[in-house]
Amino acid sequence: MNKATDMGLEVLVNTENPEQTLKDMQPFIDLMMNYECALMEIETKLKILNTEFTLRHNRNPFESIKCRVKQPISIIRKLQKKGLDITIENIENNLTDIAGVRVICSFPEDIYTLSDLLSKQDDIKVVTVKDYIRNPKKNGYRSLHLIVSVPIYLSDETKQMNVEVQFRTIAMDFWASLDHKLKYKKDNLKHPEIIEQELKKCADTISALDYKMQEIRNMLED
Ligand code: 0O2
């Protein structure tokens, strides 16, 4: 037996019987495929809304969209953090962000237009909403987070899958990527609190700018 960390997932590889290892991993591979399918569903829904808006109103509510399935190593770490065993059931029942979509909009108003239109669709169930735009985090983080449940139609069954959809403006995304860097470098910094304060100031400036730009856009459209 060998321990493999390929794909970041720690599995015991039966070197005499690798077929058995693959068989053991099959439920995990299937689950990840289901999340990939759920991502495709949500991405298509959002792209359809964007296309329709572009044609009818001559403006695109989002600038870009990014989809990702969480890496196995991050799944393991998150389960461990929650004190849970690494099982398929625990992944499905306790983690809601395995499939993630990030939608980057130009203006805050478009975030709410898009998220409302998505939430209202017949086959979408909204599981949770965290509005860090109206209620920013203490560090200044702003985004609108939705966990939605979407059906995927497989050959022999229909499954409901959770997808986390994060809506942000370009400016909020720019801020979040810098803040993300701080998270990993914090331990090596002499005065992380100074950077935290500066970032918080930037978050407030960015927010004011977002709304000012929106005002100008609305004046232009009027
Ligand atoms: P990654 O690598 O982006 O996936 P939960 O996930 O629900 O158990 P939590 O913290 O209650 O935990 O969820 P929440 O608040 O909805 O935040 C989840 C995700 O939002 C994070 O995922 C980040 O992507 C983003 N996020 C939340 N707070 C911050 C922040 O202060 N700064 C930045 N840059 N991003 C943030 P992960 O799993 O942490 O990471």
Image (spheres, helix red, strand yellow):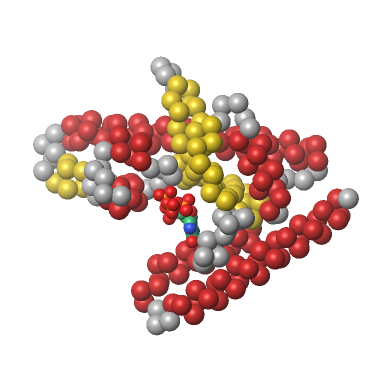
Q: Residue at x 73, y 60 (%)?
A: 211
Q: Is residue 176 visible?
A: no
Total marks placed: 0
Q: Residue at x 45, y 32 (%)?
A: 161
Where residue 169 sits, quadrant-wise, is bottom right
Q: Position of residue 2 (x, y in %)?
A: 14, 46
Quarter holding the N terminus? top left
Q: Residue furthest top?
A: 156
Out of 218 and 126, give the one closest to the viewer.
126
Where residue 160 sits, quadrant-wise, is top left
When the figure is inspected, residue 137 is found, relative to residue 20, above or below; the finding is below
Q: Residue at x 68, y 53 (%)?
A: 108
Q: Position of residue 210 (x, y in %)?
A: 70, 61
When the figure is inspected, residue 178 is found, relative to residue 121, above or below; the finding is below
Q: Residue furthest right?
A: 222
Say left or right for 222 vs 64.
Answer: right
Q: Residue furthest front?
A: 135
Say left or right for 212 vs 74.
Answer: right
Q: Residue at x 48, y 26 (%)?
A: 152
Q: Is residue 158 visible?
A: yes
When the figure is inspected, residue 13 is found, relative to residue 5, above or below; the finding is above
Q: Position of residue 48 (x, y in %)?
A: 66, 34
Q: Position of residue 188 (x, y in %)?
A: 36, 77
